[in-house]
Image: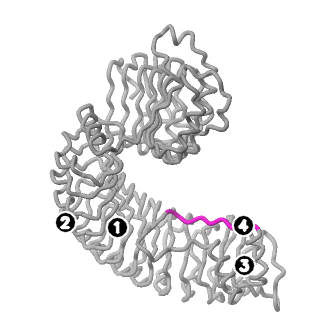
Amino acid sequence: MERKKALSFLLLALVEWVPASRSFEPTLRLRMHDMVHDLARHVAGDELSCTNGVANSTTKGGKLICHYQLLMNSNESPSSKSLPPKVRAMHFRECNKLHLPKQAFSHALFLRVLDLSGCHVSELPGSVCKLKLLRYLDASNLPIPNLPKSLNRLLNLQTLILSNTSLKALPTNVGCLQKLQYFDLSGCVNLHELPTSFGNLSALLFLNLASCHELPTLPESFGKLHKLQFLNLSDCYKLHSLPESCCQLHDLTHLELSDCHNLEKVPDCIDQLSKLEYLNMTSCSKVQMLPESLCKLMMLKHLNLSFCVKLRHLPASIGVLRLQSLDLQGCFFLVGLPDSIFNMSTLVHVERGLFAFHIRSEVDKLREQLNLERSCVLDGRGDLWSQILELEKTPCLELQIKGLKNVKNLEGADQAKLLNNSNLTSLWLSWGHGESSMVEHADASVDKSVLEKLVPPRNLGHLHLDGYVSVDFSRWMLELPSYLPHLSTIVLSNLEGCSHLPPLGRLPNLRALGLGRMPNLKSVGREFYGDHGSCSKLRMILLEGMDNLEGWWTTRTSNEDEEFLIPNLHLLIAADERDLGGI
């Protein structure tokens, strides 16, 4: 019995497990202590085989006798007879040159788990469809254009991961997978249709269709997925509407619609999604209004409407909802906030970001009235590094550090780390070099050293840099995609020395960029995008007092037929600047 427990624990460390509960968290990553690992290996004995480019010597009659096999860096194509006949789980890692023949798994009939994501095969071996006991299949990142029609034989399959494959269509009989609970098709950029039988996946709990750019519609049978709890449709650019049948997804708790650029409205019957807790409509740029029926979703806790640039009105009775978080930043055409919203006592967080002036005052009023202020202010005139250490004891979401021009001593900076404040979502760093005479006497090298020490936490969403005078940026500013991959808004103002922007175009989630009063910035060139950057999510560029800005490169070369590098820009606001002939 103890032997089986150890094997189960070891398997859990290798295999992604899909929970049957209603709560879907990000991919689970487990770490195993070396001593526990050694114990598990000892208990497992010959049950586990790890092959790293060379053959494994644990054989019986010329065959492996293990139940769990991991192949790493292997380029030798396995024959069906060379595989362990009673293997339960197989994982391939970094086997990019490995060729899998069609009959590769014809004798591994006891397989429950098969992970092919570490291979580079152009088609799924047909023998996979003979694995009647298979419960978990990961074929992600494979350049496979289609799936075998006999896939419907995998009647015990519970998890199917086909993310980032070259699939153009699914087999028409995919609905026969009656036990499938977890289905990941994210990043299938060539997928243009879901078959009618898709609605027959009656056990499905989790469905990820994110970045299926060519998918224009969902089948009417979609509403038959009655057990579905998690649905991700983000970055489905061509999706223009949701079928009315989607309102029959009565168990749905999480609906992700961000960056559905062509989605014009949500169905009036959305109130039938009575268990919905999370709704993200970030950057649904064609949505102008929300149905009043939305206000009947009494389980809804998180509503994100950020960068819905054409949204003009919120439902009058939105205040009856029991929201915990609300994000309206970037809704520049919003006329105002309904009176009822000021009575929403359940709110604990209202995002504070880019707003039109009249909306900003109402949002500030809402935050003040509901006592939602969780912002902190530190002053560089005092002992900044001690203040940052104390900050770790405070649940601070928004932080402003002013007077950084006064910081001359870096003693204690290595112990005081902003990145330890994991709750921080918004950071404003202000040097306060206001007058030109002060700028002339500012020590740019000190400014850079101070900035180098103020590395924000990885989950930061908003960054404002003001009054920084150095020509050069700190290392973390030059490598923002690595340090701050979730950054969605960045504002740079009063940067007297800046003549070239850091590669902000490489930020994968950048949605709004503000530039103000940077006299030495005359053009934005290729360096803005980096080697392969493309601002696919950038929606707004706000320019103020950029009198010397003359041009902005928006293609890789001067060829007008080149791909536009800011393809989804919805709003450009430019004040007090000269003609921008390069935009």
Q: Which residues are magenta?
A: 26-34
Residue wearing tag 1: 253
Query: Mark 2 belongs to which amino acid?
Result: Cys
Along the line of sight, the residue nearer the viewer: 134 or 188:
134
Q: Does the magenta run of residues contain 438?
A: no
Q: Of callouts 2 and 4, which one flags the residue occurring earlier in the amino acid sequence?
A: 4
- Predominant secondary structure, magenta span: loop
Q: Name the disc covering residue 269, or none.
A: 2
Q: Name the disc covering residue 78, or none.
A: 3
Left or right of residue 141: residue 169: left
- Relative to 567, say whether 579 is above or below: above
Q: Quadrant of the C terminus?
A: top left
Q: Quadrant of the N terminus?
A: bottom right
Residue drawn at point x = 55 percent, y = 25 percent:
382
CA–CA distance in space, label 3 to label 4: 32 Å
Find out whether the residues at labels 3 and 4 contact each other: C-beta distance under 8 Å: no
Q: Does the magenta run of residues contain 28?
A: yes
Q: For the residues carrying marks 2 and 3, which lies nearer the camera in this image?
A: 2
Colour style of the rendered protein structure: one colour
Query: Mark 1 belongs to which amino acid?
Result: Thr
CA–CA distance in space, label 2 to label 4: 51 Å
Q: Name the disc covering residue 33, or none.
A: 4
Whole-percent x, y for residue 463 in the image: 47, 36
Residue drawn at point x = 53 percent, y = 82 percent:
135
Q: Of callouts 2 and 3, which one flags the residue occurring earlier in the amino acid sequence?
A: 3
CA–CA distance in space, label 1 to label 4: 35 Å
Whole-percent x, y for residue 425 in the image: 46, 43
Along the line of sight, the residue nearer the viewer: 386 or 397:
386
Give the secondary structure at mark 3.
loop
